[in-house]
Image: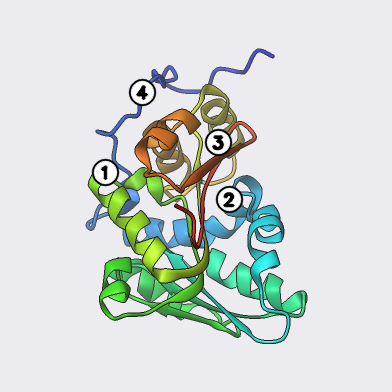
C-alpha cells in the first residue's frame, strides 16, 4: 500500500528517534487556552488512536478483583481522561476500581481536578518516585503516551518505580514510530483539532517515539514489548517476572 504524503512540510526522516524535538504543551509558558483545549480533546484522540478499550479488556480486566477493591495508578495522567475511562469501564463491568492519577504538571493537575468527578477517581500532583518513597503500592500501574517524553535515565527510573508500586501488573502504552503512523495522524487530524496542540504535538510525539526493537533494547529484563497495529506499543510487566 502506498501511503499518502502528509500535507505541509515533507515528512521527516523517521529512521531514528528525534530527541531534539519538543512538544509545545510541555513548555511552561505555552498558551493556556490552547493547552486546556488540548486536554479537553485528549478524550477523543485517545479513543480513536490509543486503543485503551481493548487494552483494558485484555490486559487489565483479568486482574480486577471480582468481589473486592482493585487499585490502579495512572502515571502522567495529564487531563485525566484515561483515569476516568478506566473507572467507568470497570464499574459497568461490575468491578470496584479505585484509580489514582498522578501528574507533576500543576496545569494538568488543576484541569483534571476541575472536570466533573467520576466515582473512584482521584488526582494528585506527584511523581512516581514520591509514591515509592512514601511506601505506597497499587494492584495495577499504567501510563499512556508517556515513555517517549523520557530520556534513558528517566525511563529506567519510571520502570523501576512501576515495579515497586505494582503488586500485580504494569501496562505502559505508547506510540510506535513509523511512516504509517505519521502519515495517517497527519492527514486524519488536519481538519479536526484546530485551536489546540493535538496535531503538531502528536506529530512531534511520533518523531520522538520508539520502534518495537528500540524499546526492547532500552528496557531491562522482565519487560515485554508488544506491537499492536502500525502505531501502538505496549510495554508490560507482571509481578514476579525476572
Image position, residue 50 (x, y; %): 59, 49
Between marks 4 and 3 in the image, the one whose residue lies nearer the viewer: 4
Label 3 sits on residue: 190
Task: Look at the picture and state if 95 lies above or below 22.
Answer: below
SS assignment at label 2: helix
Residue 55 quadrant: bottom right
Q: Label 1, label 4: how many angstroms apart (C-alpha)?
A: 14 Å
Label 4 sits on residue: 16
Q: Label 1, label 3: how many angstroms apart (C-alpha)?
A: 29 Å
Image position, residue 124 (x, y; %): 37, 78
Q: Residues within 10 Å of mark 4 (few under 14, many from 20)?
A: some
Label 2 sits on residue: 45
Q: Earlier in the sequence, mark 1 or mark 4?
A: 4
Q: Label 2, label 3: how many angstroms apart (C-alpha)?
A: 13 Å
Between marks 2 and 3 in the image, the one whose residue lies nearer the viewer: 2
Q: Residue at x 33, y 67 (%)?
A: 128
Q: Earlier in the sequence, mark 1 or mark 3?
A: 1
Q: Label 4, label 3: how many angstroms apart (C-alpha)?
A: 25 Å
Q: Residues within 10 Å of mark 1 (few under 14, many from 20)?
A: few
Label 1 sits on residue: 151
Does the CB distance between marks 4 and 2 fall below 8 Å? no
Query: Seen from this angle, which residue lies furthest top?
Result: 2
Q: Earlier in the sequence, mark 2 or mark 3?
A: 2
Amino acid at each position: 500500500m502506498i501511503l499518502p504524503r502528509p500535507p505541509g512540510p515533507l515528512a521527516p526522516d523517521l529512521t531514528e528517534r528525534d530527541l531534539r524535538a519538543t512538544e509545545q504543551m510541555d513548555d511552561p509558558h505555552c498558551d493556556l487556552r490552547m493547552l486546556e483545549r488540548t486536554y479537553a480533546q485528549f478524550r477523543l484522540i485517545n479513543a480513536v488512536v490509543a486503543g485503551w478499550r481493548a487494552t483494558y479488556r485484555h490486559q487489565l480486566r483479568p486482574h480486577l478483583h471480582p468481589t473486592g477493591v482493585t487499585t490502579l495508578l495512572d502515571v502522567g495522567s495529564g487531563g485525566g481522561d484515561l483515569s476516568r475511562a478506566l473507572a467507568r469501564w470497570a464499574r459497568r463491568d461490575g468491578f470496584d476500581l479505585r484509580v489514582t492519577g498522578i501528574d507533576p504538571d500543576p496545569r494538568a493537575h488543576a484541569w483534571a481536578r476541575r472536570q466533573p468527578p467520576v466515582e473512584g477517581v482521584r488526582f494528585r500532583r506527584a511523581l512516581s518516585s514520591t509514591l515509592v518513597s512514601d511506601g505506597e503500592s497499587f494492584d495495577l500501574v499504567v501510563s499512556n503516551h508517556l515513555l517517549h517524553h523520557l530520556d534513558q535515565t528517566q525511563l529506567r527510573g519510571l520502570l523501576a518505580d512501576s515495579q515497586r508500586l505494582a503488586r500485580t501488573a504494569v501496562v505502559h502504552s505508547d506510540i510506535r514510530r513509523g511512516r504509517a503512523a505519521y502519515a495517517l495522524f497527519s492527514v486524519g487530524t488536519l481538519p479536526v483539532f484546530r485551536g489546540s496542540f493535538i496535531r503538531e504535538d502528536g506529530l512531534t510525539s511520533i518523531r520522538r517515539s520508539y520502534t518495537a526493537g528500540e524499546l526492547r533494547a532500552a528496557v531491562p529484563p522482565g519487560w515485554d514489548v508488544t506491537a499492536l497495529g502500525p502505531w501502538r506499543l505496549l510495554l508490560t510487566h507482571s509481578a514476579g517476572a525476572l
